[in-house]
Image (tube, grey):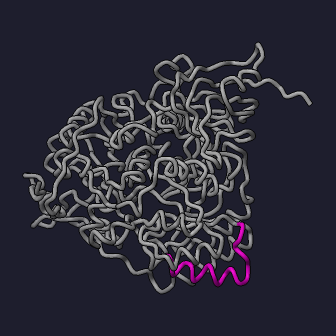
Amino acid sequence: MTQQPPDLILHNGKIATQDDRRSVVEAAAISDGKFLAVGSDREIMLLRDEHTRLIDLNKRTVIPGLNDSHLHLIRGGLNYNLELRWDGVPSLADGLRMLREQARRTPPGQWVRIVGGWSEFQFAERRMPTLNELNQAAPDTPVFVLHLYDRALLNRAALRAVGYTKDSPNPPAGEIVRDASGSPTGLLIARPNAMILYATLAKGPKLPPEYQVNSSRHFMRELNRLGITSAIDAGGGFQNYPEDYQIIEQLHKNGELTVRIAYNLFTQKPKGELADFQNWSGRLTPRQGDDYLRHNGAGEMLVYSAADFEDFLEPRPDMPGVMEQELKAVVSLLAKNRWPFRLHATYDETIAGALNVYEEVNREIPLQGLHWFIDHAETISQRSMDRIAKLGGGIAIQHRMAFQGEYFRDRYGSAATKRTPPILEMLRTGLPVGAGTDATRVATYNPFVSLYWLVTGKTVGGLAMYDDANRLDRMEALRLWTVGSSWFSTEQGAKGSIVAGQLADLAVLSADYFSVADEEIKNLESVLTIVGGEPVYAAEEFADLAPPLPPVLPDWSPVAAYGGYHKPATAPAVVHSHAVEHRCHEREISGGMGCLCWAF
């Protein structure tokens, strides 16, 4: 049978195919949204006819489209246009300037939200903002600043907006920090979990549906700018099914998804988890959907009694005695219905308890073939990895330690930090491993920050956590973001490589990932991103290929002024310190002088 000519040929490039041989080729041909052939320019150009489109790659490096195996994309999209992002901002002074400017343009009744993706260690000043600084920057506009999942800072206007007063009781899982008179200072502490932070943020205004559509499109375009073409959505607190999935369903129906999404369902009701999954399993079949939007199973929250939030400023939480009983009921249901599942678990103690349950369920209902996995696994032991391998599971890792490695080191020591998480041990054990970010709140959505962390073993503040025993070379780090992540949505062999028959998703990079200096990895981005053979983002010499995008709504959105991830023209100098770094005390964050405890 005669082969149909390709719709598109990309040539004159350095294409890292991520095939089993890690081949690098010059050209790729695409037909009907899939790769038709790859090889030399001469070989591939022989396939064209007069209708084939040609794109000259100008010797640029090309990689498979990046696949974030743990991203809160749906929730992030609904809120993106409301958020002032400090991701990548080099100094607190810059961040506060952005805050002042945004407060001036934000209309009455709206908030300024700085919701994750940053760490004080990225700043030249290496400290948090103080509450006085927030109050001075925005005396009348409510400001909510989320720091990881350990605390939030609210200015006086935000305290009024959420109604926290001297008479407000502490919630069961958090602390409203108070001054000597008993009045809230504006500092909220998550203890032992982040529910107080979620609940307070949820009090803010939401975008109307038509703006949520716009916001989701702009967030996906931002991800495309960074080379992301697929993501596994991990659900999230206060993300309800099906209500909060209507926007993404609408975009899918309209053919406007530019990131392929496999979504997991995150239970919403403590003590009602089993009822949630019983309801949902009657409405959805495993892997229901298509190549652009598909159901991916349960989690990352399966039962609330198994959630060990990764606040390394606090001691490791002990899981309640009911954890295994509650988890068994849910996992048994999922296994019976052949639903894949994922579980948020930071500490080995939590993972070991969950594996007790999984092994018990497996004796009755085999788990092999379900593509179940553990998320995070920062302190997992070799024993637990062996148990996961025996049951056919995998591990999805994220670069959370790039944002809080300093905190972990201060609590557990440098030796423990060297294997947190033990990525190379996971790979040597033969486990499927996929990379991701856990964005948008606990870390940045920028995959190149993750790749920088995997390759250098450094935090965004420059702390060298890992030695050669836990650092990956660049090709293998990239593999976790491509081939590796495809296993976690049961799409291995369908995406992740630039080979014939796989989905035609790729990113053309701004510089050569394989040769730039280590510090430049986190400054990379895409200049041409293709999903299903069609451009979804284009810049520089490819700018004419960029598809149209409506203006940001509302027009006062921080995204309209600042975009998303901050990319300075030149990378800021990394501040190095050999002195011991200490946690800022709550009274210093609340006070007016700022944190003065960092020694250089």
Query: Position of 116 compared to 50: left or right?
Result: left
Question: Outermost residue toward the top?
Answer: 50
Query: Position of 526 compared to 497: left or right?
Result: left
Who is closer to the viewer here, 247 or 567?
Answer: 567
Tell me what residue is drawn at x 25 percent, y 65 percent.
176
Query: Position of 151 compared to 138: left or right?
Result: right
Tell me what residue is drawn at x 47 percent, y 70 percent.
345
Tell me what residue is drawn at x 31 percent, y 50 percent.
460
Where is residue 599, by image quadrant? bottom left
Query: Position of 285 compared to 229: left or right?
Result: right
Q: Is residue 348 above or below residue 408?
A: below
Visible residue check, residue 210? no
Tell me what residue is drawn at x 35 percent, y 63 percent.
196
Q: Is residue 308 above or below residue 326?
A: above
Where is residue 347, by image quadrant? bottom left
Residue 180 location in percent, x, y? 9, 67
Who is closer to the viewer here, 372 or 478?
Answer: 478
Who is closer to the viewer here, 576 or 403?
Answer: 576
Q: Look at the image and say whether residue 544 sits in the magenta stretch.
A: no
Q: Is residue 459 above or below residue 254?
A: below
Q: Main secondary structure of the magenta part?
A: helix
Where is residue 319, by image quadrant? bottom left
Question: Outermost residue toward the right?
Answer: 1
Q: Look at the image and say whether residue 356 sits in the magenta stretch.
A: yes
**Magenta span:** 351-369
Residue 4 location in percent, x, y? 83, 26
Residue 511 location in percent, x, y? 43, 31
Q: Split into 4 quadrants, where in the image is the N terminus?
A: top right
Residue 538 location in percent, x, y? 52, 25
